[in-house]
Image (cartoon, rainbow, N blue to C red):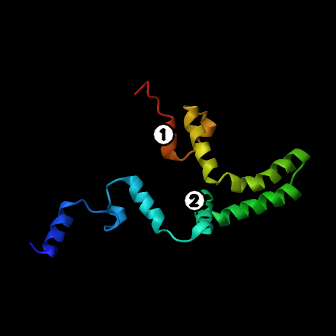
């Protein structure tokens, strides 16, 4: 056999590398897939910082800035006593803190840990989660 024929037979017999194929359709080792994706990324340390911020601060900026300014305005001008002003002024940075990814994960873990929350907390959840959380497994 010629060298070209041998190479084509070897290529058909060996499993394909995720470098050769599209990584999205690769079903092999996930750690290998992720490391190849990381090696392909460019940008250095600043790009990694930007990626981390983008992942952890996935914030709805227009609504959050509006709420931040409203909390500041009503905290400064609308509080009837020192306690209500303090709560309003502390609500301004909380608009950003609550939307951070680690805080969202912690809140979700807390809600699912409670098991059967009181009705007032249950009403704050979206409808599918309300159905899941209010399900009584003993009666089912």
N-terminal-most mark, 1 or 2: 2
**Number of marks:** 2
Quadrant in the rendering for residue 96? bottom right
- The label number, if any, that marks residue 6 in the structure image: none
Q: Position of residue 4 (x, y in %)?
A: 16, 75
Name the residue at 11% across, 75% down.
2
- SS state under label 2: helix
The quarter in which the N terminus is drawn is: bottom left
Please say if the residues under marks 1 and 2 sit with CB atoms less than 8 Å apart. Answer: no
Q: Is residue 124 visible?
A: no
User: Could you tell me residue 14's position as x and y percent?
Assistant: 22, 60
Q: Tell me where residue 21 appears, x and y as whole percent.
A: 31, 67
SS state under label 1: helix
Check disc 2 and report the residue beneath it.
55
- Tell me if residue 96 can be seen: yes
Q: Is residue 7 above or below residue 132?
A: below
């Amino acid at each position: 056999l010629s060298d070209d024929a041998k190479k084509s037979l070897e290529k058909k017999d060996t499993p394909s590398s995720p470098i050769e194929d599209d990584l999205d359709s690769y079903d092999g080792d996930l750690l290998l897939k992720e490391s190849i994706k990381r090696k392909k990324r460019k940008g250095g340390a600043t790009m990694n910082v930007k990626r981390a911020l983008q992942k952890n601060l996935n914030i709805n900026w227009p609504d959050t800035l509006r709420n931040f300014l409203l909390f500041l305005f009503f905290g400064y001008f609308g509080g009837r006593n020192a306690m209500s002003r303090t709560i309003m002024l502390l609500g301004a940075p909380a608009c950003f803190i609550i939307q951070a990814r680690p805080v969202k994960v912690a809140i979700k873990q807390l809600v699912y840990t409670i098991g059967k929350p009181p009705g007032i907390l249950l009403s704050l959840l979206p409808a599918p989660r309300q159905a899941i959380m209010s399900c009584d497994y003993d009666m089912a």
